[in-house]
């Protein structure tokens, strides 16, 4: 057998052995993805929605990420209006030991943030301040324990999954935007409350060993009153103060992709 033939056979054998011994090189890793959470996960504000009462949109960050990464399986129990008890009580039923990725946005409804915004949008400055202060007190005293319980429930049902917790954006720019807009002061204290909520969620997420994704820098310059807003104003009661389709794609999806690829 000539040297040339021996060399060719050796190369062929190496290629065959490589394909057998390193199968992962030839196929993508399995990704079984479950997206949990509230309206900021389900995609309220982006539309169109499914036929459920949860207002799930395929333009939310979760289905967009799943489609971009050709995941093995995708489950989407996130539901508009959900609180931590809903995640623990029902949404975690979509998890299993085979789940490899879980994302969740939760806590804003527990802290009553929608009611706070309503008080500030339609009420006096003093009623806005009182609502914000009550929400801040809840966020620092009661919410941490609820988040701990939520993340523990997720870990229990999906022990092999990477847990990614996404926070909430600041909703407002604080420059002048017309006589009918909320005052700069109200928008500022609401943004400060959003900052506190982000701090609390980030702290509890990291304590649970989760990845925290801060949405605020990705939405910067695109809040209500911006020239190019990615947050809906009060034009629709259900969608008010939620991201629009651009917000989910260029805000949330970009933030999630920056964090985990």
Image (cartoon, rainbow, N blue to C red):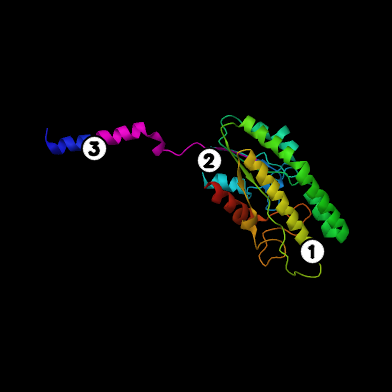
The structure residue drawn at horizontal position 52% and vertical position 45%, both measured from the top left corner, is 69
* Nearer to the camera, 162 or 16: 162
- Percent x, y of residue 11: 24, 37
Please tell me how crowded label 2 is: few (under 14), some (14-19), or many (20+) other residues with Cα within 10 Å. Answer: some
Q: Position of residue 63 (x, y in %)?
A: 60, 45
Picture coordinates of residue 116, whole percent (x, y): 81, 52
Q: Which residues are magenta?
A: 12-35
Q: Which mark is residue 71?
A: 2
Q: Earlier in the sequence, mark 3 or mark 1?
A: 3
Q: Which residue is mark 3?
A: 11
Instruction: Tell which of 244 and 112 is nearer to you.
Output: 112
**Label 1 sits on residue:** 185
**Which of the marked residues, 1 or 2, is nearer the chain's N terminus?**
2
Could you tell me if residue 192 is visible in this image?
yes
Q: In the picture, which quadrant includes the N terminus?
A: top left
Check the image and report above or below for 205 versus 93: below
Callout 3 environment at 10 Å: few (<14), some (14 to 19), or many (20+)?
few
């Amino acid at each position: 057998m000539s040297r040339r033939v021996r060399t060719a056979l050796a190369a062929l054998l190496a290629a065959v052995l490589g394909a057998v011994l390193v199968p992962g090189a030839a196929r993508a890793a399995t990704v079984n993805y479950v997206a949990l959470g509230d309206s900021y996960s389900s995609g309220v504000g982006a539309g169109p929605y499914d036929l459920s009462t949860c207002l799930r949109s395929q333009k939310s960050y979760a289905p967009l990420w799943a489609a971009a990464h050709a995941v093995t399986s995708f489950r989407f129990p996130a539901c508009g209006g959900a609180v931590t008890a809903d995640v623990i009580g029902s949404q975690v039923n979509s998890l299993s030991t085979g789940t490899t990725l879980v994302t969740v946005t939760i806590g804003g409804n527990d802290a009553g943030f929608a009611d706070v915004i309503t008080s500030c949008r339609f009420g006096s400055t003093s009623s806005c301040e009182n609502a914000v202060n009550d929400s801040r007190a809840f966020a620092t005293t009661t919410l941490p324990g609820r988040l701990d319980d939520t993340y523990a429930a997720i870990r229990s049902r999906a022990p092999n999954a990477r847990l990614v917790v996404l926070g909430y954006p600041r909703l407002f720019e604080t420059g002048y935007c017309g006589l009918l807009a909320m005052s700069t002061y109200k928008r500022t204290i609401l943004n400060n409350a959003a900052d506190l909520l982000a701090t609390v969620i980030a702290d509890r997420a990291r304590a649970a060993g989760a990845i925290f994704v801060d949405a605020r820098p990705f939405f910067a310059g695109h809040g209500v009153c911006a020239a190019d807003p990615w947050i809906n104003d009060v034009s629709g009661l259900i969608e008010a103060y939620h991201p629009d389709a651009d917000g989910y794609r260029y805000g949330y999806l970009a933030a999630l992709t920056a964090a985990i690829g």
